[in-house]
Image (spheres, grey):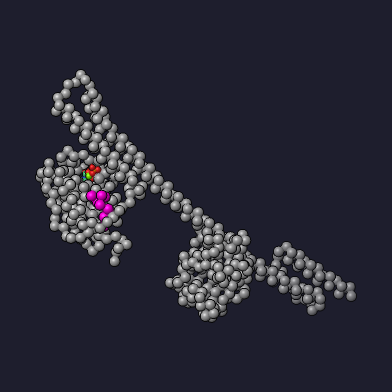
């Protein structure tokens, strides 16, 4: 009897020890098989409990690993990619979609989707109204919804465009999960499978176990993405401001340098003219006044050029393009520049120009042609010939100004269209040169969606050319 009492005590003691181990979190206990009495049944129940606890523990471990893997993504895109890779062990899918609520939760916009197949019909930026949508009830209940036969569902609800698109993609069952971060609905995660009857309550349960955490991670990724976008925009704006600032500083430097001499010379002449002691003939006086006039004119042109580049650069110049006959544009430009050419005995010849119009801003395009023609005259030896041509192409015009000047060496070609690039070619008739003409010309051509360039063999002249569209982009057939 005593022996039996002793053995029961030992068995109970063993069970108490096992229970204490469970309390301490050690679920890997082994209770030996026991006789089928009450203590034995208690032992069996404890063993079962230990097994269940161990399984639950493993499951929680795995889910924790999953959320920390997902959490390791910083930007929303990274978080979603992690979800796509890591959820596979828990929930089956061929596609995951992710949508966010917008406009005080009245609109749902698809932000991301990835599938085992392409193309996706319901893709990024797809939007739908929340009001009246079945998704509203999912948000209200906070619980996932399973549809295991989407074709049936569509037959019952033919007005659902999103379901139709999914069925067209080949999706047959779906698990739609709400994302509710810190008590506020933020969107949905859509798990979809190409097979019917893929989803069971167990999948929804798994989702629910980490729904809160997942929503917060996704929300965090979304905010980080917005911040990253804003940071990039700010950086771009900052570097643009820096660039304009640098340009302005360069211009100020150049303006100070290039304007100081002429101002000083105007001052000197003015002082001279004002001195009563100095007797000047009418001719000398007229010469001095002519010098003042020329110098002031040059300063005015330089200032205009500087203001021009600054306003083009800061985006303040908007073109006002109209369709204009190419031949008239070129005839006028040749006529305007004859007064520069004649004193040098240079001939400007206009090739036969075919009929047709170009879509241009007239004052700006005149500026371009004046620059190219004046350069051709300025840098070519006296008595040479400048030829102007225009060839219509498919939907563009190619205009060329050919001269017999010194040409452009390959080394200098890169600097040609940059600000203040006075190169080795010097004006051959004492003309002024500031090095801004071609940089303004390039900007105007680019504003016309065109391109500009030069073909030249050093020593044998240059052909400066540009190509501009002959029709407005919106009029393109
Ligand atoms: N047709 C040409 N042949 C040879 N060199 C040229 C020709 N056109 C321009 N260049 C070289 O390129 C440089 C830049 O030309 P750009 O028209 O920009 O300025 P610029 O003529 O010096 O001054 P401006 O601002 O008055 O036009 C010139 O200084 C010259 O050295
Ligand atoms: Mg020039």
Residue pictured at 18% horizontal, 54% vertical: 328
Residue range highlighted in magenta: 359-366
Residue pictured at 12% horizontal, 41% vertical: 343
Judge whether residue 150 can be spotted in this image.
no
Say above or below: 132 vs 432: below
Q: Is residue 291 left or right of residue 475?
A: left
In the image as oriented, which residue stretches furthest toward the right? 1
Q: Residue 404 appears at what percent x and percent y? A: 14, 48
Q: Which of these two is toward me, 309 or 356?
A: 356
Judge whether residue 434 can be spotted in this image.
yes
Figure quadrant of the C terminus: bottom left
Residue pictured at 49% horizontal, 75% vertical: 164
Say above or below: 275 vs 216: above
In the image as oriented, which residue stretches furthest toward the top? 277
Q: Residue 410 appears at what percent x and percent y? A: 22, 49
Q: Image quadrant of residue 70?
A: bottom right
Q: Image quadrant of residue 256?
A: top left
- The majority secondary structure of the magenta stretch comes to helix
């Amino acid at each position: 009897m005593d022996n039996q009492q002793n053995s029961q005590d030992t068995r109970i003691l063993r069970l108490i020890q096992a229970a204490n181990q469970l309390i301490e979190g050690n679920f890997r206990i082994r209770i030996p098989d026991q006789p089928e009495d009450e203590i034995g049944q208690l032992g069996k129940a404890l063993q079962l409990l230990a097994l269940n606890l161990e399984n639950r523990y493993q499951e929680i471990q795995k889910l924790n690993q999953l959320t920390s893997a997902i959490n390791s993504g910083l930007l929303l895109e990274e978080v979603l990619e992690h979800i796509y890779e890591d959820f596979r062990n828990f929930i089956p899918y061929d596609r995951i979609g992710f949508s966010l609520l917008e406009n005080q939760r009245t609109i749902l916009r698809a932000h991301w989707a990835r599938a085992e197949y392409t193309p996706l019909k319901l893709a990024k930026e797809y939007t739908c109204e929340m009001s009246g949508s079945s998704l509203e009830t999912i948000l209200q209940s906070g619980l996932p919804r399973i549809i295991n036969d989407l074709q049936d569902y569509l037959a019952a609800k033919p007005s659902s465009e999103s379901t139709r698109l999914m069925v067209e993609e080949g999706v047959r069952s779906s698990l739609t999960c709400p994302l509710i971060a810190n008590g506020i609905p933020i969107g949905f995660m859509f798990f979809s499978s190409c097979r019917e009857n893929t989803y069971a309550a167990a999948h929804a349960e798994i989702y629910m176990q980490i729904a809160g955490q997942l929503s917060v991670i996704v929300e965090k990724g979304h905010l980080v993405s917005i911040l990253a976008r804003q940071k990039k925009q700010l950086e771009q704006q900052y570097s643009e401001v820096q660039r304009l600032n640098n340009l302005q500083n360069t211009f100020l430097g150049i303006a100070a340098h290039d304007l100081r001499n002429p101002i000083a010379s105007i001052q000197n002449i003015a002082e001279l003219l004002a001195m009563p002691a100095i007797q000047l003939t009418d001719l000398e006086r007229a010469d001095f006044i002519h010098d003042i006039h020329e110098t002031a004119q040059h300063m005015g042109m330089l200032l205009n050029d500087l203001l021009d580049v600054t306003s083009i650069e800061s985006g303040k110049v908007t073109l006002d393009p109209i369709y204009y006959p190419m031949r008239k544009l070129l005839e006028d430009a040749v006529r305007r520049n004859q007064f520069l050419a004649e004193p040098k005995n240079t001939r400007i010849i206009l090739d036969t120009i075919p009929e047709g119009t170009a879509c241009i801003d007239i004052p700006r395009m005149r500026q371009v042609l004046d620059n190219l023609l004046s350069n051709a005259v300025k840098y070519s030896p006296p008595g040479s010939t400048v030829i102007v041509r225009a060839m219509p192409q498919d939907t563009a015009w190619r205009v060329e100004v050919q001269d017999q000047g010194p040409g452009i060496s390959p080394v200098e070609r890169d600097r040609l269209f940059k600000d203040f690039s006075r190169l080795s070619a010097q004006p051959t008739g004492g003309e002024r040169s500031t090095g801004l003409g071609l940089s303004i010309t390039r900007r105007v051509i680019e504003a016309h969606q065109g391109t500009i360039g030069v073909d030249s063999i050093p020593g044998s002249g240059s052909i400066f050319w540009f190509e501009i569209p002959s029709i407005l982009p919106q009029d393109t057939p």
